[in-house]
Amino acid sequence: MARFLRSISVELKLTSTANGSSFQFPDVPQLKNMYVQGVEAFTDSEVGKTPTQTVVIADAAKNGILVNFVEDNLTKYENIPYFTLIARHNGGLIREFKNWKVNINKSGVYIGDNTSLVINTAVFFTFYYTEKPI
C-alpha cells in the first residue's frame, strides 16, 4: 500500500440533478503539482455533512454518478463509477493511483442516473497525495 503523507477533502455541490449534467471540481491549490496516491469517495452512510454543512449524497444515489479525472489536459480516468471509489465497497481499501498529477479544475462528475439524487447535496472525496513521487 502507498504511503500517504497528506490528505485533503473536496466537496462538489450538485446544483442540478438532471441526467447528463456535469460538474467540475472547485480550485484546490493544495493539489497543484502534487502526486495523488489515492482517492476515496463518501455517501451519507459514511459522512453525513461536508465541512461546509452540505448534506452528502444518499447512499442510494451512488450508482448514478460517474467520475472523470484529468491529468494536464487529457482525461486520464474516465467514467469511473462513484461507488467504486467508496472504501466500504472495496473491503475498506482506498482506491490507489500511482504518482498521478490531477488537474482538479478540469476533473469532475457526470450524472448518468438521477434516481435518489437531491439538488444541493454534495459528492464528497478525500484525495491522498505526496509532494514527490513514491
Image (cartoon, helix red, strand yellow):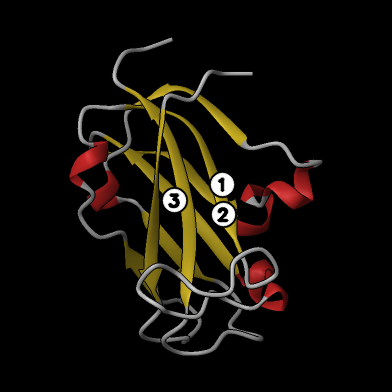
Packing grade of label 2 (10 A; few <14, some 14-19, many >=20) is: many
Instruction: Report the residue that reaches farthest toward the top.
Output: 134
Q: Secondary structure under badge 3?
A: strand
Residue 39 image point, x, y percent: 51, 41
Q: Are marks 2 and 1 in contact (CB under 8 Å)?
A: yes
Is disc 2 placed on a helix, strand or loop?
strand
Disc 3 target residue: 68
Along the horizontal axis of the image, is 72 left or right of 49? left
How far across and down, in percent of the image, does residue 105 sit? Answer: 23, 51
Question: Which quadrant would the N terminus be assigned to in this image?
Answer: top right
> Which of disc 2 and disc 3 is earlier in sequence?
2
Q: Residue furthest right?
A: 91
Say if mark 3 contacts mark 2, CB within 8 Å: no
Q: Please, what is the three-letter code of the amino acid marked with disc 3?
A: Asn
Which x, y percent locates residue 12?
37, 67
Q: Say what amino acid the circle numbered 2 marks.
A: Ala
Distance Cα–Cα, label 2 vs label 1: 4 Å
CB contact under 8 Å: marks 3 and 1: no
Measure the C-alpha gap from mark 3 to mark 1.
14 Å
Which residue is the site of mark 2? 41
Which numbered disc, 3 or 1, marks the residue that appears first in the sequence?
1
Pick whichever, 50 or 36, lies toward us: 50
Residue annotated with mark 1: 40
